[in-house]
Structures are given as structure tokens and as C-alpha cells.
Image (spheres, helix red, strand yellow):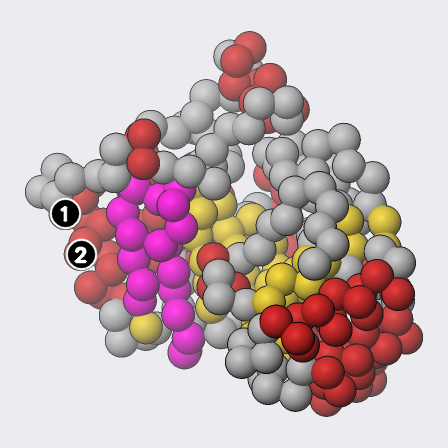
Amino acid sequence: MHYEGQIIRPPSEADSILLQVTVGCSHNSCAFCGAYLGERFRIKDEDMVFADIDFAARHMPGMRRLFLCDGDAMAMPAPRLTRILTRIRERLPHVGRVGVYASAMSLAAKSADDLAALKALGLSMVYMGLESGDDELLAAMGKKVRGEDMLRQARKVRGAGMKLSVTVITGLAGATGWERHARLTGEALTAMEPDHAAALSLMAVPGTPLYDDITSGKFIPQDARGLVLELRTLLEHTHMPRGLFLADHASNHVPLKLRMPRDRQYGLDVLTGAYQGKSPLKPEYKRGL
């Protein structure tokens, strides 16, 4: 397989074929993200992608999931995505699910008919980074989209019959704006009705604008107990009619995997106990991105 730069994939795609179709992120301006620092977004040569599909067909014939890397591979034009998905279907017939990162901007460039056609070719899992339901915070972090934009695209994804996984970040508002961030993010998740909601905890990455703000004292980050209370507040305002609420990323102090709405109260109780010191938090040295 031909990989360039840093390959990023969701935790749930750990057992998937990782097929890199783009390099970097089409936006790459989020203040907190260091995944693609200095990397110019580009679409990989189609012949190289096809060669990687053929390699996977020879060496990974039994794998049933595939993830299209990297950040926001949905930014590729629909005709090129169509050709890649068609080749995957032809050469990897056992693959039953293809996943992709997508932004509100790249999804806005695709029509409902485009998404339906991609779904018919096997693209069935879309990962979106909501990060926060607070529009002011999104603007401060360089997201350049509003919660309303992401809600509109989430509905389009679900309307195409695709599954939707939405990521949020606790700690993104620091030690002062956390409560508003948690409340509005929970309300946004409720409106989006994802199949999976995945909560990560902020970890500052050297070289990012947010890291510089932290080192200069402009941004005061949450401490461990504050992050636990923030996650509890977020969950308290999240009312998903179905699906999973996940906080099992390595960055989190309290791992959770909740079936909603059945396990919601259990999760609230676990977080309350952790905040009150009744159960230990993951030590800092075990946290990671």
C-alpha cells in the first residue's frame, strides 16, 4: 500500500483496510488540530489508488471493512469517488462497509442523489467532526461552519441511508466556557440523531494555534475533574433515540460505551462517581491521541 504523510482513522476502523485516496485535510485550519500540520491537501493519483485496491485484493481478501483516508476524503469529486467505489466492489467483493471522513463543506458539495449513488456502491459510514454546538466557539477555533450547517448535512447523510458518526471534543472551551459548550453540544447531538456520538477530550498539540494560546496563558484548559464534569453535562443534554454514545477514546479519563437511551443514566452515574472521586481517573501518561 502506498501511504503518504500521517494516516488518521477513527478508532472503530482499527480492523479495516486503510485505503488512502487523499493526502491531508481539505480545511486544515482548525486551531486545535495538529494532524496535518504543513500538509497540502491533494487527491492521490487514481492509478496508484487502483494499485492499492489490487494489493488489498491479493493480500487482504477476507477483510470486510474499508476506510477511505485521509481527512475529509469526501471532498473528492463524486465521479472519482464513484470510480474508486466501483473498483472496490469489483476487486474486494467481501467488503460490506466503506467509511469516510466528511466535513459539512464537502457534503454540501454533494447532492442528495450523489450520496444515494455512493451509498448504493457501498459507502455506508460517514464520520463528521461537530466538535461543538456553540457557533461562537466554532468560529474561534477556525471551523468556518455553524452548527446549523452540520445539522443540515447530517440530515442529508441519514436521508441517503448512510450511518452517521459525529465527533465532539470536551475541553474545547477551556475552563471558563465549558458549561455553554457542553450544553449546546449535547443539544446539537440530539438534533443530529447520529448512529454514533464519539466524545474526545482536548489534548493540546505543539505547533497548533491553540497550543500557543495555552502556553501564553490566553487559554486556560480544563483539569481532569473538570473534563469529567463537562462530559457529564454534555451527556445530560444529549437525548439520542438510538445508537451509541462513546467516550472510549484514549484521550478520555473515564471510558464509556453506552447504548442510547438505555444506558444514559448509567453513564451519568459513572461520571458522577468519577467526579466525586469514588473511582479513579485514567492517569495522564496513559492518555493519547
Q: Is residue 176 above or below residue 186?
A: above
Reply yes or no: does residue 230 show up in magenta.
no
Q: For mark 1, what is the residue?
A: 273
Q: Is residue 101 left or right of residue 281?
A: right
Q: Are marks 1 and 2 in contact (CB under 8 Å)?
A: yes
The quarter of the picture where residue 76 lies is: bottom right
Number of on-image labels: 2
Q: For mark 2, what is the residue?
A: 269
Can residue 72 be seen by looking at this rendering?
Answer: no
Q: Is residue 250 left or right of residue 4?
A: left
Magenta segment's dominant SS is loop
Q: Is residue 215 above or below residue 15?
A: above
How many residues crowd around disc 2 within 10 Å: few (fewer than 14), some, or many (20 or more)? Answer: few
Three-letter amino acid code at disc 2?
Asp
Reply yes or no: does residue 245 show up in magenta.
yes
Q: Residue furthest front?
A: 58
The residue shown at (77%, 60%) is 21
Nearer the observer, 92 or 24: 92
* Disc 1/disc 2 C-alpha distance (Å): 6 Å
Range drawn in magenta? 242-258
Element at label 2? helix
Three-letter amino acid code at disc 1?
Gly
Give how far across and how far down residue 45 sits, in percent. 89, 58
The residue shown at (70%, 58%) is 1
Q: Is residue 168 left or right of residue 232?
A: right
